[in-house]
Image (cartoon, rainbow, N blue to C red):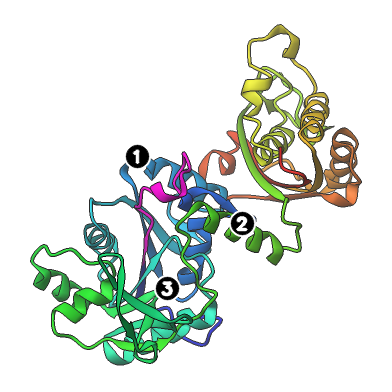
Amino acid sequence: MTPNGTTAEGVGAVLVAAGSSTRTGAAVPKQFQRLGLAPMFVRSLRAVLGVSAEAVVVAPADYVSTAERLLREAGWDGDLLDGKRVAVVPGGDRRQDSVERGLAALSQAAEVVLVHDAARPFASDELVARVLVAARDSGAAVPVAPVPDTVKRVEDGAVVATLDRSVLGLAQTPQGFSRSVLREAYIALGGAAITDDAAAVEAAGGTVSVVEGEPGNVKVTTALDLELAAARANAELGLDAAARVGTGSDTHRLVEGRRLILGGVEIPFEKGLEGYSDADVATHAIMDALLGAVAAGDIGQHFPPGDPAYKDVSSLFLLERVAAIVRERGHAIRSVDVTITAEAPRIAPHVSAMRRALAAAAGIGSDAISVKATTTEGTGPEGEGLAISARAIAVVSGTSP
């Protein structure tokens, strides 16, 4: 059973994240930009993944690798996220093309499908559950929110009618369908363009049931929408409006003849991490997270491999430099969370020392530094003892540069 009391068995989700996002004016499509601790599309994905057994993210063809990288930072192992199968496929030219590609990538076990827009990152668990229940009962369901304002029909720059808003509604996502109902509706379209999936079922003569939508389930479309969404996500975390979040990750191979340095602490072990500096993956991940939070590039730009100044240098020294960059840009480090992935050696006995070392280098209290460790249960390069990796999240606050 899911947290909402519904079962995820036989349910698949298609997250439509294939838009170009031109109206935000951003260089990177809005769905891949960060809201709070996660990219927008990951927030939207998790909204439907909670009641689904599997999901497919449909991304722009040029951003498939970006989507996969961001999913890995969220914990995706290339197959599972939060214990559910997640795949990424390239989208098509039109919405229905992208949805059809998502449907084709779902397993045959998915008899009910939730289609959700990546640009709606605030759909509540309750809304998703309502849509799923209605879709199972009726074959097609759409959440609809009331129209809050008077609606005018305008032609040639003049009002020609005032519409009765009591019979109008604003369609939202996720929308839910019997898979067969949606597939047949798409076939019946014959190539006609649609703006949402319920419209395909309507055009095919089907009945779409309505569930109560949510005013807060807004769609991020413009640059102002994106700014407001970021502030809302920060507020959910108790952060001020100027707070910014960054992520970082690093992996190095284990080799003989090197000291093992993690989180600024030397750990007794028969192997160390290979790299130009001390190859401290935990500290490197933290530095990239901090630089990302203030949009200052990455550690390779600031401390390029091959520069003699950084040969075997302590990563704690480099972290001091990064913390200075954060402060120079008008921000203060609020918190850092790093997870180290290693099959061996045991990290737990060294966590307290790591927190103290990292906090001193970053110029913050050790209570603002979290260090965790995990394994991959014998899978992958970390599980086979070939490498150690780390992922970090950093939160900074202050005035934007």
Nearer the observer: mark 1 or 3; the answer is: 1
> What secondary structure do most residues of the magenta stretch adopt?
loop
Q: Are marks 1 and 3 in contact (CB under 8 Å)?
A: no
**Residue nearest the observer in this picture, 42 or 256:** 42
Which residue is painted at 18% across and 63% down in the image?
193
In percent of width and height, residue 33 lies at 53, 49
Inspect the image, locate mark 1, and give the three-letter code of the amino acid beneath it: Asp
| Residue 243 point in image, percent of width and height | 73, 51
Magenta extent: 14-29
| Camera-side residue of 35 and 46 | 35
Label 2 close to label 3 by CB (< 8 Å): no
Above or below, 74 against 157 in this view is above
Would you call the spot at circle 3 few (<14 residues within 10 Å), some (14-19), or many (20 or more)?
many
Q: Residues within 10 Å of mark 1 (few under 14, many from 20)?
A: few
Dot 1 or dot 3: first in sequence order is 3
For residue 183, say whether it is visible: yes
234 or 322, which lies in front?
A: 234
Q: Which mark is residue 52?
A: 3
Give the residue type at disc 3: Ser
